Image (cartoon, rainbow, N blue to C red):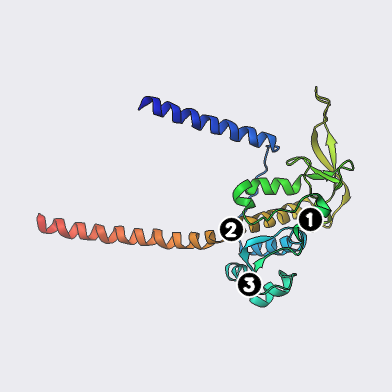
Amino acid sequence: MTKNFLTRAAVFAAGLLLSATALASGGGNLQHAGTDLNDKASLQRGAKLFVNYCGGCHSLKYLRYATIAQDLGLSEEEVQNNLNFTGGKIGDHIVSSMTPAMGVAAFGKAPPDLSLIARVRGSDWIYTYLKSFYLDESRPVGWNNTLFANASMPNPLWELQGVQQPVFGRKTASGEMPVEGFTISQPGSQDAAQFDQSVRDITAFLEYAGEPVALKRQNVGVWAILFLVFFAFVAWLLKQEYWRDVH
């Protein structure tokens, strides 16, 4: 029994070490997204930003337009006019107009579906990633990313954020110059606080897209707790009545 316990502990420790290594290789130092799935206004803004700046390349193949309308408190007309630019029906899945072949021709690889990106990477990773693009003329796409180096995609939000230039630190022993910060060489349409909120809204929407049922589960959870409290009160009354007869 002791040997099994030690073996499991060793496996668990190794898993933590691998996770930490993977995080470090992905850039680490994630910024806190601060998303709130109960904020429907944020989810609505995030949906609009996603279809305008991300949906041209990336799909959400596990999510339907009708589901967005129901969950985010939007009418069918609002969804079709503001969130559906592919001409699909309200019951269709959200699929990008960019085909895999077009993606390969433009970026060297097909843009991935983002239905489950928040469940795979986490909200903090998405938030940090979208804020970490910087101009890099040595790259074919003209951009790079400190969290996900040599990403195949350009900065989709540069019009909002502005053009971000890297501030390099001292050269390392390997000859590399790490990026230690950024400066904005060309302002975007939003200031820093506004841009942070826009990225937070997109992140919240992708978090919702990864598990739409989470919204319903939270509401059901409240009623379940209230039922348990009520049931506990009834059980207490029954106990009082039973022991009154016993005594």
Relative side of 243 to 89, left or right: left
Instruction: Report the Cα–Cα distance between label 2 and label 3.
Output: 16 Å
**Residue 74 badge:** 3
Location of residue 202 in the rendering, given as x and y in whole percent from the top left corner: 69, 57
Q: Amino acid at mark 1?
A: Gly
Location of residue 93 in the rendering, given as x and y in whole percent from the top left corner: 64, 67
Q: Nearer the viewer, residue 64 or 32?
A: 64
Which is nearer the N-term, disc 3 or disc 1? Answer: 3
Relative side of 21 to 220, left or right: right
Q: Nearer the viewer, residue 173 or 56?
A: 56
Outermost residue, bottom side:
77
* Secondary-structure class at tag 1: helix
* Circle 2 residues within 10 Å: few <14, some 14–19, many ≥20: some
Location of residue 192 in the rendering, given as x and y in whole percent from the top left corner: 78, 50
Quadrant of the rendering where the N terminus is positioned: top left
Q: Residue at x 40, y 58 (%)?
A: 225
Which is nearer the N-term, disc 1 or disc 2? Answer: 2
Q: Amino acid at mark 3?
A: Leu
Of circles 3 and 1, the one toward us is 1
Location of residue 120 in the rendering, given as x and y in whole percent from the top left corner: 61, 48
Which is nearer the N-term, disc 2 or disc 3? Answer: 2
In the rendered structure, are the residues bearing label 1 and label 2 in contact, judged by CB atoms less than 8 Å apart?
Answer: no
Q: Kindly identify which residue carries mark 2.
A: 37
Q: Is residue 224 visible?
A: yes
Q: Kindly identify which residue carries mark 1.
A: 103
Q: Amino acid at mark 2?
A: Leu
Outermost residue, top side:
173
* Secondary-structure class at tag 3: loop
Instruction: Report the Cα–Cα distance between label 3 and label 1.
Output: 31 Å
Q: Is residue 124 above or below residue 168?
A: below
Q: Is residue 161 visible?
A: no
